[in-house]
């Protein structure tokens, strides 16, 4: 039977009397937004990744170091690296760099609206908040991080307001009310644009600091090994008939099959990694 940290978000666990029949039970988790699962057999513990990691040199790049947990020294495997994903730090840094460009886009957008109004020429940038680069990203972006997803909702109102004044300014310009148009632009500079810049800066800090990962500890032979994952979803029963084990092009021994569960596809892994794994 395994234990889990009380601080981890709740998920369904099997009852004690079911542990004699766990061959078809899997712990489902996320890596880079994709669902994976380990067999629950030999799973000892689920906990938040400890901060006290000794990052010693090891013979494979997917070894993240070692940590002490309940008086045991546990080697840690970063599944993102093993499965050729970007690390969670690399992913956050790239996202921040992209969002800095989207922040600058909106500064430039308001500047161009202002200049085109003063110069009494046509404003040609989009007034649709869903068609700018940030709007397209915002509408499509999905994350299982509740803190980040909740914070992103704060962008919706000021972002729509900024683009909305583009339409209002165009109408005022056609009516030769350029002074009113400039007043409207100055107002959005002092309010919604400042708010969006503040939200971007707070989001950058949030993305850097809110990178909590989960550790799954398994007993493999006579050793405990920890696997670093993004987030845990639940424990799931997967019937054998739902599993495809003949995976074309699979070169990683850790990948053992694909499970198809209604609308979900889950990649099944083995916690026993062969030492020649590349």
Image: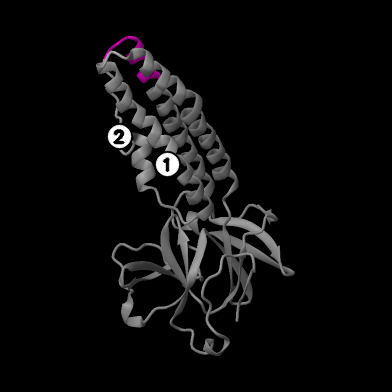
Q: Is residue 25 left or right of residue 55?
A: left
Nearer to the camera, 95 or 64: 95
* Image mark for residue 19: none
Crowding near pointer 2: few (<14 within 10 Å), some, many (20+)?
A: some
Q: Quadrant of residue 114?
A: top left
Colour option used: one colour
Residue 227 rendering spot, x and y as whole percentages: 55, 64
Q: Residue drawn at (56%, 38%), measured in percent from left and top?
A: 202
Q: Which residue is mark 2?
A: 128
Residue drawn at x 30%, y 19% is 172
> In what quadrant of the picture does the C terminus appear?
bottom left
Mark 2 element type: loop
Residues in magenta? 111-121
Q: Check whether the beta carbons of the residues at disc 2 and disc 1 lie within 8 A of each other.
A: no
**Would residue 277 be visible to someone looking at this image?**
no
Q: Is residue 22 above or below residue 148?
A: below
Q: Residues within 10 Å of mark 1 (few under 14, many from 20)?
A: few
Q: Against 267, is 131 above or below?
A: above
Q: Nearer the viewer, residue 251 or 106?
A: 106
Mark number displayed over residue 156 = 1
Residue 113 x/y as whole percent = 35, 20
Q: Label 2, label 1: how many angstroms apart (C-alpha)?
A: 13 Å
Q: Main secondary structure of the magenta part?
A: helix
Q: Residue furthest right?
A: 71
Q: Is residue 245 magenta?
A: no
Q: Nearer the viewer, residue 74 or 159?
A: 159
Q: Position of residue 186 (x, y in %)?
A: 45, 20
- As helix, strand or loop, the secondary structure at mark 1 comes to helix
């Amino acid at each position: 039977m395994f234990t889990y940290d009380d601080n981890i978000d709740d998920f369904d666990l099997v009852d004690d009397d079911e542990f004699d029949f766990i061959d078809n039970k899997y712990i489902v988790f996320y890596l880079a937004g994709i669902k994976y699962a380990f067999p629950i057999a030999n799973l000892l513990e689920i906990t938040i990744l400890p901060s006290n990691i000794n990052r010693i040199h090891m013979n494979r790049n997917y070894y993240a170091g070692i940590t002490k947990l309940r008086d045991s020294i546990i080697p840690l495997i970063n599944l993102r690296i093993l499965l050729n994903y970007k690390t969670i730090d690399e992913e956050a840094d790239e996202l921040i760099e992209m969002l800095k460009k989207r922040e600058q886009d909106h500064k430039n957008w308001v500047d161009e609206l202002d200049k085109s109004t003063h110069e009494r020429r046509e404003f040609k940038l989009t007034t649709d908040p869903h068609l700018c680069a940030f709007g397209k990203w915002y509408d499509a972006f999905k994350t299982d991080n509740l803190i980040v997803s909740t914070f992103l909702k704060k962008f919706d109102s000021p972002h729509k307001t900024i683009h909305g004044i583009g339409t209002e300014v165009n109408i005022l310009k056609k009516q030769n009310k350029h002074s009113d148009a400039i007043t409207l632009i100055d107002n959005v500079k002092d309010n919604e644009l400042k708010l969006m810049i503040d939200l971007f800066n707070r989001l950058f800090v949030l993305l850097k600091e809110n990178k909590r990962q989960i550790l799954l500890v398994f007993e493999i032979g006579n050793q405990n090994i920890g696997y670093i994952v993004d987030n845990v979803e639940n424990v799931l029963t997967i019937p054998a008939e739902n599993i495809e084990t003949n995976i074309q092009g699979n070169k990683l021994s850790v990948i053992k099959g694909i499970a198809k569960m209604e609308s979900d596809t889950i990649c099944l892994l083995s916690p026993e990694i062969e030492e020649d794994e590349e």
